[in-house]
Structures are given as structure tokens and as C-alpha cells.
Image (tube, rainbow, N blue to C red):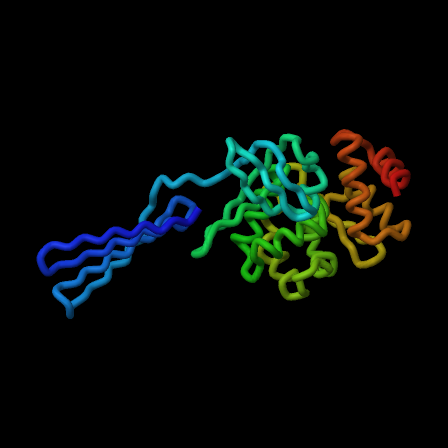
Amino acid sequence: MIARLCRAYSAQNVHILIETTIIGRGFCFVRVYLCYGSGIGLAVHVLLYTNVGVIAVLQGEVLEASPLGVVIDVGGVGYEVHVPVSTAERVPPVGGRVRLFIHDVYREDGQDLYGFIRREERDFFRMIVEKVSGIGPRTAIALLSKLSLTMLSSAIAAGDVNTLARTPGIGKKTAERLVVELRDKMQAFSGFAVHGAVSVPGGVSYAGAASPVCDAVNALVILGYRPDAADKAVQKALAKLGPEASTDALLRAALAAG
């Protein structure tokens, strides 16, 4: 969390004020003000690396839960964490225990925590906010709430600007930046290798079409589902059946639940 520490020293006609601001990610900003008598002053600004810890994981009891946020009790301290809908749906009810992978954002007036059930989702979120200009944490959360990680990585790898632009806060130009900045980074995510692209009705393209998840989403879109609804239905089926589920099993479970 951001903290400001101020200390003042005086000796004869020399006055010194030291202001230290912790700005996160192991860095702090130090301002040193020197004043001689009452008329001559000097300010020195220094950026220092410190051993300030970064929150990577929070595990504790759920105190509050909403579609885009959760409060977790960790050792008697309540942490408010922003989460995408995909994570909120997997957070247990109040009183249950949860573990979230955290990305922390430090500002001048405070600190925001963003949490994810899966490490890959946290890493993907971090990559978006750090690598793509014009996309902040709130927009990235909206993106991961609208589309699953599978669909997002596939859309970016396939250059599918139309699917990305359907997310609130993501226009066509921002979607194009997503593709340009991140397309060559998709293979860094285990399980999201690119094997080509397949187009389906509605202007949606999926890379890695050999994946049972992508095949099941494609089939639902062909049957008339909206892409985001198809993706959500298959992700729910995947959570129920497990990662080894076949395309047919995922499709049957998604249709049965719909």
C-alpha cells in the first residue's frame, strides 16, 4: 500500500525535510528539501529500489462477495479485491475459504488489488495492463469478465478485432492495439498454443481450433448462440466435467444447462 513518511530536521540555519513515498513494485520515491535560513532552498528527488513486498496471493475467509469484488479476511485483516465475473462465479459463499492470485496497482491516493482464481488469468491481466497502451485495470477486468481466457487468447492470436471490440470500453482501435501488441505473446501461455484459425458465423475466429473447448464454442455459435454466451456455457461445462472433457461431452453439458 502507498505510504508517505515525512521527517523534518533542523540544525542552526539549515532545515531538512525528507518525504518518502512507497509507490509499489519494490520502489519508493524520495524527496529531500534543503532550506538555508529563510530564502535559499534546494530540492532533490531520488527513485530508490527497496524490499517493499508485493502481494502475490491472498488466501482466507470470504467476508463479502459481489459480481465484481470480494473481501477476504487474511489473519484478521480484510482485503478488498476486484475480480472479473469469471472469478466471482467460482468464489465460495460468505464464510468459505478462497485463494486468489493477486495483481496490485499502486496510485498516489491508494492501492487496488485485482484477484483471479487461476494464475494464468492473473498473468494475462498483468500483460494487458502493462503492455497495451490505453487499457487500464478496470477495462482489463471488463475484458476478462466478458470473454474467458481461452476465447481471449484465441481471438488475439487470430486477429479477431470484432470479438474483442464487443467488450465495453474496448473500441475497434483499442482492439487492434491488443492484437498488434500481444499476438506474438499468446504462445507464452501454456495450453493456448496457436494452430491456425477457424472462422464461424458472426465474424468470430478461433485460433487453436483443435482444442475441445474451442470446438465446442464454435459449435454453439453455429447453432445460434452469441459468442460470449457460447463461451460462458462451455466454460461452465468445463468446470463441471474437468479439463479432460471431450468436445461432445462439453457440447452436451452446455446444451443441457442452457
Quick one: quadrant of the C terminus?
A: top right
Residue 251, given in percent of the width and then of the height, sits at 86, 39
Near-viewer residue (22 or 231): 22
Dividing the picture into quadrants, the one containing residue 210 is top right
Q: Is residue 210 visible?
A: no
Q: How many marks?
A: 0
Q: Residue at x 76, y 29 (%)?
A: 244
Q: Residue at x 85, y 56 (%)?
A: 201
Q: Residue at x 63, y 46 (%)?
A: 69
Dividing the picture into quadrants, the one containing residue 249 is top right
Residue 65, given in percent of the width and then of the height, sits at 66, 42
Q: Is residue 252 visible?
A: yes
Residue 74, given in percent of the width and then of the height, sits at 53, 33
Near-viewer residue (242 or 11): 11
Q: Residue at x 67, y 35 (%)?
A: 94
Residue at the farthest bottom position: 39
Position of 177 compared to 6: left or right? right
Position of 39 compared to 54: left or right? left
Position of 7 compared to 246: left or right? left
Near-viewer residue (101 or 149): 101
Residue 134, given in percent of the width and then of the height, sits at 56, 62
